[in-house]
Amino acid sequence: MKNTLRSRMSLLHTWAGVLFSALLFVIFWAGSLSVFDKEMDRWMMPATRLSLTGDAKVSIDKQLVPILQSKAPHAAAWTIILPSERVPYIALNYGSEEARKGQRIWLNPDTLQEITPADSKGASGFIYPLHHNLTLRFNHIGTWIVGIASTGMLCLLISGIIIHRKIFTDFFTLRLFRSFGRSNLDIHNLTGVALTPFYILITLSGLIIAFSTYFPNAHLPLYAITSPGHVLKKDHARPHGVLPAERQFLKEALGRERHKPAKSSGQLASIDQMIADAEQAWGPGAVYFVRINHPNDAKSNVMLRRHSHATVSKHIDYKRYRATDGNPFNTFEAPAVVKAWNFIAGMHYLQFKHWTLRWLYFLAGLTGCAMIATGLFFWLNARRSKAARSEQKHVVWMDAITIATVSGLMAATLGFMLANQWLPAQARIMGIARDQCEVYVFYLVWMTSLLHAISLTTQRQDKAYLHAWWQQLAVISGLCIAAVLSNWSNTGHHLYVTLTRPLPAVAGVDMVLMVGAWMAWHASRRLRAHCRLHRQQG
Amino acid sequence: MSARIQTFKTILSSLALCVACYWTTEQWIALTSCLAYLAGLSRANAVMLAAMLGFVYLWLLLLWAFAEHRVRRQCMTLAGLWLLATGLTWAATLMITPALTGSR
Amino acid sequence: MSSNIIIAVVLLQLAQGYYALAMRHYWQQVMHDSGGSMPHTPRTYRSVATLLLGLSCCMMIASEGPAMGSLLWILAAGGSIISTGYLLTRRPGWLRLLCR
């Protein structure tokens, strides 16, 4: 092969694709679902399916502080998260210095009745972490793996464009009724080219969000000189082992700082007044987050943050008030470049209120999944036709991995949702808590899918992998229907109820499940017919 | 067997290339943050700008490194870029130290 | 979804349709049985398409603001490319409406 740019990029595209595709599919799938993580939470936590009326104005001083005073007067911090359209309940968190949000109470904003904890991680507690760190938190291993795969994705996108021989001539070409290889490659090219700007934007922003993990020494040239502790050892006197230089950088860039308590008792002034004061600058109803650091201490302070519903940027600005007299003493506003970083982060976090854009993100994410999967299919199809039977061991294994990655992951997600519906409340199975059991079901279904795929793809029968595909797709279809019916039977919230009450989050999840069931069933039926035809011909 | 050795060599050299690109990027981030500070940005802004640009540097470096087939040229260029960034960062640090330890 | 967004999405779809028609092989695909030569030059189609593309971008930005508008436009543009590809393969005759 000639060493041309196209041939080198082709090699890069092929092998980076083979190496990262499965991982990228997991990241894209979990990311697409995370677009609607709060809506999935409502589906998985029926007690939180509340319709926010917006009539009742909660008084933090009169209604919420007494609850926290009675539950945790000596906590290191109290956190109050006010309800919003997507999270329609009041969340109260409190805990020690090490786990400031260790304990939680959820309240109905209209009645202030406590909501029974769902005992489930929900999508925001499992699918979202799966997206950004694969739930491997130890030493940021998961974040690093995701970062490496994302960098691979960026290289794949550019190399893919370079190796596309007829990028302009075949710009709209989608030959769905030709051979599998042709139509598959057309889908790969079209979905790849059409949404390249989105893929670059979402991948690069995902990396930029976690810059401090990927480039942990970036701050050293400018901060080590004034905070030299970094070269010696960790400053164990400081909580969480953050080094002085990094601490100073985080304070200046992101406003992260902690004030020490006086360790003598103090009064708590009106938080409602503080919110009123902050909302004079930020606009009515802007405050959504209240943190009372060292409550009942003479040096207690109250930090207020504003929501990011109306802007793409994810606000990190805050105002701090002295808890004892209610006077503001510190306002943090992100510096100019940090604002740009917030904007980039906001594009990825998608916390703004824009339903059209949210659905488009979801669909674009799923299109990304389709692009990755068709890339894998292309590689497999090309190797399958080229390699002799004896040399196909690697193709067989790659086939199994692809099936487990694509259909297995979908089945595992549905297994996770079904486990959430059917595990008894407060259940402990072999000492494992209920929320953890849901996660185990996810991995169990995923492993079962892999074993099923291996058992079929390793058979000597020709096109055995197709059997694995149609069978798993049929299971996915069944699981989707089972999930919708389970929700109906366990909560009574069938589609008519959720559409009329209205509970749009639950209705949306149910409808996506039904569309998914139809698509999986349709694909399964087509593949099964293809298998039958092949058997008759063979 | 020779094919296996060749595969092993390719994997190792690709990994080495990725690590070399990452190290070079780290040095260029350091240089960028110093230059941005010298250009008048605050420390926090300078570091943020450099860290964000770092991903673009890494992306471009990786693409260039895998597009280049001459191993010698890959090594020389990456080493050269690393040395250049390290040297310039050192020089820039000398210039910014008084400002950092002073009143600014 | 505001009416401005819907109009902008329609304009995007039309723009991609005209871009497709500006390419001879897609033109032939659309006109497979009726034949005939292009009534306008490819450059004319491309100019109209670019105009529509710009107009849709302006509409989205005017309607949703520069940040959300441009995000929306990038995603909707991607969607319209895919749907044009789908139209060309499933219902190429529909694009004949644009030739008049």
Image (spheres, helix red, strand yellow):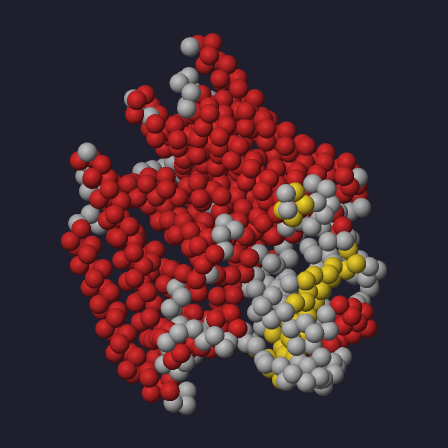
Q: Residue at x 46, y 53 (%)?
A: A142
Q: Is residue A120 visible?
A: yes
Q: As rendered, which of A186 and A73 lies closer to the eye?
A: A73
Identify the residue at the far bottom of this view. Answer: B103
Q: Position of residue A392 (x, y in %)?
A: 33, 26
Q: Position of residue A450 (x, y in %)?
A: 48, 32
Identify the residue at the far left of this view. Answer: B72
Q: Is residue A107 left or right of residue A441?
A: right
Q: Residue at x 79, y 58 (%)?
A: A114
Q: Residue A516 falls in which quadrant of the image?
A: top right
Q: Position of residue A31 (x, y in %)?
A: 53, 48
Q: Is residue A305 above or below residue B69?
A: below
Q: Residue at x 51, y 35 (%)?
A: A447
Q: Is residue C21 above or below residue B49?
A: above
Q: As rendered, which of A239 and A187 lies closer to the eye?
A: A239
Q: As rendered, which of A412 and C75 lies closer to the eye?
A: A412
